């Protein structure tokens, strides 16, 4: 009996069969491409966040100037509504301090390409003190002006000090740094007096 002519050795069949790709190789490459894509997207996102996040140096300086101008106006107009002699004295010192500070900041601002009398209208609008003015008017009508004024102005000076500290740590301008140090030093006693008055009346 002769062997079937259609039968082939197994080795021969293995040799002519197409080589199968190792499972998982394509998946690994695909996952690697996805990983690289995600990494690049994350890097681009971080760079965009760093470039757009936070206010610019110019915006911070304009905010500082606008806020000080507003606080000067509020302290000046509030003088007539204050009943306490002690608070009135503190407020007179505050008004004088803000008047001098608004004058002294002009040169450092100009050196940093910011014009105090031509600030961005959006920043001026944001720092117009409308909310504080309304709060003080309500306090005047309710005969609680002194306590509310001391509390509100104390808070405003605290935020002003924080803004000045933030600017100080980022600016390289010598004249601006000198202004910030001097202004912060002059403001500390007033902040203390307002805080003390506020704690006594609470």
Image (spheres, helix red, strand yellow):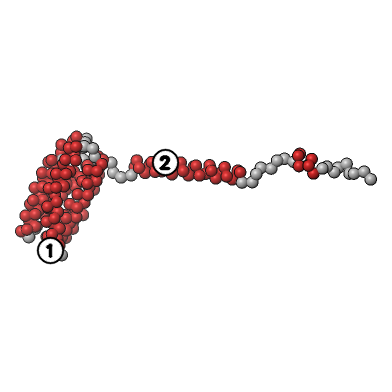
- N-term-proximal mark, 2 vs 1: 2
Image quadrant occupied by the N terminus: top right
Q: Estimate the x, y position of residue 162 in percent, counting from the top left.
A: 22, 49
Identify the residue position indicated by label 2 in the image.
44
Q: Tell me if mark 2 has few (under 14), some (14-19) or many (20+) residues whose alpha carbon lies within 10 angstroms of its own.
A: few
Q: Is residue 164 left or right of residue 83?
A: right
Q: Estimate the x, y position of residue 105 in percent, counting from the top left.
A: 15, 40
* Residue at image point 13% right, 59% down: 196
Task: Give 13 or 37, whichever is nearer the viewer.
Answer: 13
On screen, residue 108 above or below 84: above
Q: Is residue 117 at least partly visible in the picture?
A: no
On screen, residue 157 above or below 14: below
* Residue at image point 8% right, 57% down: 87
* Residue at image point 21% right, 54% down: 131
Identify the residue position indicated by label 1 in the image.
200
Q: Estimate the x, y position of residue 124 in percent, counting from the top left.
A: 21, 45
Q: Is residue 106 at least partly visible in the picture?
A: yes
Q: How many tags in the picture? A: 2
On screen, residue 81 above or below 7: below
Q: Secondary structure at mark 1?
A: helix
Q: Tell me if mark 1 has few (under 14), some (14-19) or many (20+) residues whose alpha carbon lies within 10 angstroms of its own.
A: few
Image quadrant occupied by the C terminus: bottom left
Q: Give me the disc on residue 81.
A: none
Q: Secondary structure at mark 2?
A: helix
């Amino acid at each position: 009996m002769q062997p079937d002519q259609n039968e082939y050795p197994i080795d021969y069949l293995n040799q002519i069969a197409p080589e199968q790709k190792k499972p998982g190789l394509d998946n690994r490459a695909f996952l690697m491409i996805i990983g690289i894509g995600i990494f690049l997207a994350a890097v681009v996102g971080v760079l965009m966040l760093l470039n757009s996040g936070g206010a610019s140096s110019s915006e911070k300086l304009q905010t500082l100037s606008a806020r000080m101008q507003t606080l000067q106006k509020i302290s000046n107009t509030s003088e007539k509504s204050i009943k306490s002699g002690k608070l009135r004295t503190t407020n007179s010192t505050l008004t004088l301090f803000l008047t001098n500070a608004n004058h002294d900041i002009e040169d450092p601002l100009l050196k940093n390409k910011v014009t105090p009398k031509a600030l961005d209208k959006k920043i001026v609008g944001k720092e117009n003190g409308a909310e504080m003015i309304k709060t003080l008017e309500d306090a005047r009508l309710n005969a609680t002006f002194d306590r509310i004024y001391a509390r509100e102005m104390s808070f405003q000076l605290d935020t002003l000090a924080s803004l000045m500290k933030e600017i100080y740590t980022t600016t390289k301008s010598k004249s601006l740094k000198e202004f910030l140090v001097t202004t912060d030093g002059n403001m500390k006693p007033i902040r203390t007096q307002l805080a003390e008055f506020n704690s006594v009346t609470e």
